[in-house]
Image: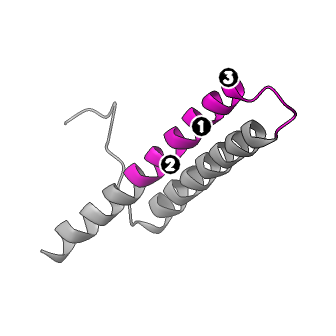
Amino acid sequence: MRSKQNGMFKTLLIVGFLLLILWHLGAGLYYMLVDKSSSKRTVNSLTWRVGLSILLVLILVLGIHMGWIKPHDVGQSAG
């Protein structure tokens, strides 16, 4: 049971990061279309998106390296 909860936590963490990345991407698009002044809201939103994306990749690489996340054997023969 503990393993299933641990797997759910990892999945929720990754999905949460993806939702935050999409939120900031949408906010950047909105600010780009709405702001006509020299506001830095677009730049800030897209900077957050890039930072969150890099952090997510680093977390995934660390998780795979430490053995917390087991990647699928995509492309491996089943023999």
Relative vertical location of residue 39 with respect to residue 6 in this rendering, above or below? above
- Name the image quarter holding residue 39: top right
Across and down, in percent, residue 76 comes to 31, 34
- Determine the secondary structure under disc 1: helix
Residue, disc 1: 27
Across and down, in percent, residue 23 comes to 51, 42
Image quarter hosting the N terminus: bottom left
Viewer-closest of 50 and 39: 39
Relative vertical location of residue 52 with respect to residue 67 in this rendering, above or below? above
- Of the two numbered discs 3 and 1 on the same chain, state the one appearing first in sequence: 1
Instruction: Give the residue displayed 47% in from the left and 52% down from the top.
Output: 17
- Name the image quarter holding residue 68: bottom left
Relative vertical location of residue 78 with respect to residue 4 in this rendering, above or below? above
Viewer-closest of 43 and 15: 43
Question: For the image shown, how many numbered marks are present on the structure?
Answer: 3
Instruction: Give the residue displayed 36% in from the left and 49% down from the top.
Output: 71
Image quarter hosting the C terminus: top left
CA–CA distance between discs 2 and 3?
20 Å
Magenta residues span: 15-39
Residue, disc 3: 33
Residue, disc 2: 20
Instruction: Decide whether the magenta segment is chiefly helix, strand or loop.
Output: helix
